[in-house]
Structures are given as structure tokens and as C-alpha cells.
Image: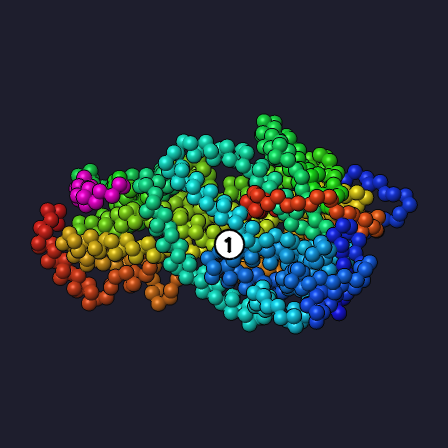
Amino acid sequence: MIAGRYFDGRSAAGVDASLNFGADGKVHLHGAVIPIAFPLAEVQVSERVGNITRRITLPNGGVFETHDNDAVDQALELAGIQRGSALVHWLESRWHIAVASLAAVVLVSVAFVHWGVPAVANWAADVMPANVDRSIGAGTLDVLDRVAFRPSDLPNERQQELRKRFIDMTQPLDDGHEYQLEFRHGGLIGANAFALPSGIIVMTDELVELSRRDDELVSVLAHEVGHVRGRHALRQMLQAAGISTLAFALLGDVSSISGVLAAAPALLQAKYSRDFEREADSFAKLWLREHGIAESNFDAILCRMSATDGKVQDEDNFDFFASHPSTTERVRCTKEADAEKDGAAAEVEASTASPTD
Amino acid sequence: MNENPYEPASPAAPAPAPSQPRVLLPFEFRGSGSEYFRIWIVNLLLTIVTLGIYSAWAKVRRLRYFYGNTFVDGQSFDYHGQPLAILKGRLIVVAGYVVFIIASKMFPIGAGLIAILLAFFGVPWIIMRSRKFQLRMTSYRNLRFNFDGTFGGAMSAFIGWYFLAVLTLGILFPVWVRKRVQYSLDNASYGNQNFSFLTGNGTYYKFCLITFFLGLAVYLGVFLTLLGLPGMREVMFPGEGSATGVEIMATAGLMGAVLVIGGIIALLGIAGYYQASFANAAFGGIMAGSQFVRSNLRAWPLIGIYVTNLFAIIFTLGLYYPWAKVRQLRYQLDNTAIDSDGNLAAFTAASGEGIDAVGEEVGDFFDVDFGI
């Protein structure tokens, strides 16, 4: 006998009642005005979730409610009724299953962040036309000019010279992006170059001064072109959207944290940024190889840039929040490599006979 | 913040039947965070493994857990949504979305027009259907709740009053907030007993105005703090200040920190006050026959729950989520009660309870809950 309450479905008034699963294949209810019995097959037993009130719906529209979930489960088992939902409750009520599920969810989430989000963003970016990129970075250079840069001090002829090489580089690409090279005095930013999604690539005077050969500057430009061509700004935005979606899917709607979930993408931005740097590096190296320029040019200028950065890079420590891979990972700055590079660079210089050197 | 965040439930004074003594029947939540954690994580994994298909089943189990642990007068609520119906509704919505995306590629202008029409007519329709689905799928003592709000009513409450609020530059905004709640509650019923919504415009004006001024104060506070930072003037009015580049860069970083931290505190504080006031005004305004719902949420405890939940979730990398959800719900239910004539058994079923299924599940997809 399972104790509970019976509600006939016509009024909210309930009566204390009891119910049993008879050996005759019928469910017997006692306590209603008259005892009633129904064939087991016509009775619906609600699924067990936690320890919520169990609802046994009878074909006459009445409902028997009980808190004695275990008794109902035993009766169902005795009656030989097996259900898939019982399995879910079994899973939900065991701590070791919960811990294993947690581990699996974490693994899947990490895999999603590592491979899934970039893959989906890449696919989505491919579908979007190139003019989307132009709208992302519009106005960025104005802000930078106001806050960080001064006009370039480079002589006009020198600028034209480099622009010509840049045009020679970008014209054959024909990938829908409008490439443009700009020079600025970097000031605090120092020797550097970067790409805006619109195709504008900014190079600082300091970088030009730091270089020993134009091929070094060309290799940096190739890296920046790699960013534009790879549509890294757009993909960065799409990946941020993907991470937000994941965070909301996992943590849903606790009203107090929805504002903070919006910040979740920021935590992973650095990781994705390093991935993009590696991608731009490999584009640059491929391009250099195809155009007969020694890759060592790229290594050389990168090593010199990190040396003049002024800060001692602790290369053994992996910094999760670093936006770039460590220089040692990207290139080999050992003395041995330097020696090799100098040799290779000398060869290249000799063979290309660049007029500026 | 404000001196007295306590927002009393202030429906029109109830008229108790003189013969019967009134009793206060408190709501109670009997679930626990650790139990819900196991349900949550197992269902999350099943949802991921089935590429989201199981989410319909997970949703039903989650809602049944919360409804089934909500007790008043010794009896619990139950949720009757069917996973397959919910899945069907979701598939319809996803299919419609895909069709729309393809159509917008082929006919950009036509699709844009359709999007605008959908926003105007589709949103109220969806709200109507989803209210109907939510209430019809809810039972208590084997009687169903119901909702008979019309499409016209939803158009008026959600769109008509929205435009009036905009046209009056926000003066009618609190009325719009109230109209939406009124639409949801005035049209609800339990058994054959219709609900009435009693909270007046005054209550809505009061807490909307306080919220507005709190928001304004926070906004001004953040703005003035930023102005006080060295180099800030340089960023805002280039060429006027004398800050160096280093100062400007430092300011940009500080600005980010101030905006983020200030933003979160402001969000939680104002959200706590608004949510408490909103729930009190909405639930506290329900009358069903001679039963009145009382809602006495207070802002400070709610803000405390928001803040501690937030930090606990951050420091446990999200693991605290199930406990957070249970805590929030428990606070709300602990402070809600039915002011009753002691006779909840007197409700009777409505006649002809047929369920017209088409479209209800579609509304469910958007799941526009309010309050709880």
C-alpha cells in the first residue's frame, strides 16, 4: 500500500488515499468515495525527478499523488515495468556519475573551444563577403592617430619605395581586400607594424629604422597581409560570439550573472590571438619562400624587435594572457641561428641586388 | 543606495469575508542545490552527446524538478510539457529561421520587410502562445492553470503601449511595464477561477522612477570618476590637455577596469532593486477569488544573493550554478505567500478542457518567462 492523496480532477479538494499494484494486473485505489481499480496499462506513472511528488494519472482523470517515490519504483519493478526514464533518474542520483559527467562536459567544452569555435568561425567568415571586414575597422586608424601616433618623419621617397614593393606584393593576391600601406611615427608603440581589417597596414618609422634590409620589412608586411587575408579580425569577432553562446548554453539564465557571461570571450581572446599570429607567420614564410626571399629575414627582424622591446622575456613561463606566441617559439634567436641567418641574408642580398642596400 | 528598498505589496485592500478568518499560506521550496547539481550536469552531458536534441527532455526534467519542489498548503505544482511537442516546436522555429536566412539572401528587401512585420506582429503572438503553453502545462491539485489572453490584447500591451511610451519620451514607460504584466496575469486562470491583477500604476511609477534615478546616479558617478583620472580629458577632448602618452595609456586601462567593476556593481544593485519591486508588484497583485498572493521580496537580501552567487560562480568556474539557481528561487518563494480564506480546496475545474496544440510549442521555444 502506497499512501498519498487523491484528486479527482473536478475540484481542488483532495482526499487521503492509498494505492496498490495488485497481483491481478490492476491498480487499486482506496480512500475515494468508492474503491476503484484500473488496468495497469491504462495508468500513467510520472517520471521520477529527484524526489518530487509522484503523480499517478488514472484513466478517469483523477490523480493519485504520493511522496513515497521508492514504494512506487518498487511496485513498478514488481509489476515488470521497465522504463528508459528510470535510467536517467538512476544517473541523476549518483555522485560518481555526476563527477564523471562533469569531467566529460569539461572535456567537450575544451575541445569545442579549441577546435569547434575556430572551425565554425572560419566557415562563417568564408560565407561573408570581403566588404564586411572593411566595416569592422572603419575609424580605427583615426582613433590611433589621435591617441598614439604622430605623422611619419620618413622621407617621401623612402615611403614611395616601400609602397611600391608593397603594391608588387599585394596586387597579385587579388583576394577582394583593398591593401594600403601607411607610415606613422610610433612613439610609445615603438618598432612595430599592424594590420587593420580594412586592409590598411601601418608601419612605424621606428621599424623602418630598425631594419637592415628591405626584405626584412617585406617579411613583416607579408605577416600583416596574412592577418588581413586570413580575416583574423572578423574571425576573432565570430569566435567571441561562439564563446558567448557556449557560456550561455552551459550556465543559462541566472539573472545575476548574465552580465558577466558577456565577458567570457575576453578570457579566451588571448589564446585565439596567438593562434592567429601563428597563422600569419606561416603565411608570411610561405610567401617568402615562393618569392625567393630568405625566411631568415623574418626571423632577424623579429629577434631584433623583441631585443629592443627593452623587457627581458621569460621564455620558460607560458603566459596564458599573452597575445603573441613567445619569440623563441616563432623563430630561433640563438647565436647559431644568427650566424646562419647572416650567411643566408648575405646570399640573398647578393642575388637580389636591391638598389637600396 | 536607497534608504528603504522594501517595496510593500500594495494591491487594492482585499475585502476579507467577515465570517472566515484569514490564513497566510507560505510558498516553500523543498529542492536542494546538490540534488539539482546532479540533475543539471547529467542532463547537460546528455544534451551535448545528442547534439542538443535531448535538451527538450532536459527542459522538462528541469521544470518538473522546480515545479514539483514548489509547495503551498502541503501540495506541490507539476509541469506537464511533453518533450516531443517541445522538440517539434523548436524544429519548426529552427526551420523557419533557416528559410528566412536563405530568403534574405535571395530577396534582401522582402526579407527585411518580413523581419519588421515579424517583430511587430510575431513577437506579441509568440508571447501569447508561450503564456498559454506555460500556464496550461502547469497543474496544482490536479487542476490546470489556463490563459485566455487574445492576440489583440498582446498587440495593445506589448506594441501599442510601447509606442505610447516612446512618443511620450518615456513618461508612460511604467504604464507599459504594468500593461505587460496585466496582460499576463489578468488573463490567467486556475480551474474555472479567473485571476485579477490589482496592482495600480502608482506602484509601477514609484519603482520605475527610483530605478531610473539609481541608474542615473551610477552613470554620473562612473562618468565623474573617469573625468577625474589624469589624461582623461586628453582622450575626450584631444589637444586640450597636457597628458603624456603614458598617462593616456594608463587611463585607458583604468577606464576599462572602472567601467567593468562599476558596471557589474551597478547592474547587480539596480537589478536587485528592480527585480524585487517587479516581483512584488506582479505576483503581489494576483487575486483569485478570495485568495490573494502576497510578495514581500526585499532589495538588499536579493542584491546579496546576486553578488554572492556571482562570485561563487566565478570562483568555481560555473560549478556553483545549480546552487545559485536554487538559492535565488528559494528566497523568492520564502517571501511569497497566499493570503487565503483557508479554503484552497474550493477551486473547481473549468469545463471543456481541451488542449489546442498547434503553435503552443512554438511559443515555448522563446520561453519568455517573467519573474521566477
Specify whether residue B261 is in view: no
Total of numbered circles in the picture?
1
Q: Which residue was labeled with disc 1?
A: A249
Task: Give the quadrant of residue A179.
Answer: top left
Magenta segment, prevailing SS (helix, strand or loop): helix
Q: Position of residue B201 (x, y in %)?
A: 71, 34
Q: Give the image location of residue A136, x and y in percent.
A: 37, 41
Residue drawn at (10%, 58%) of the image: A347
Against A136, residue A348 (above or below) is: below
Residue at 67% in and 50% down: B138
Vertical relation: A142 (above or below) A195:
above
Residue A166 falls left or right of residue B323: left
In percent of width and height, residue B83 lies at 56, 54
Image quadrant in which you'd find residue B197:
top right
Is A313 on the left-hand or right-hand side of A105? Answer: left
Task: Identify the residue at the far right of this view.
Answer: B19
Q: Find the magenta span and give its range.
A: A160-177
Judge from the rendering whether residue B243 lies leftward or rightward of residue B88; answer left or right. Answer: left
- Circle 1 chain: A
- Amino acid type at circle 1 is Ala
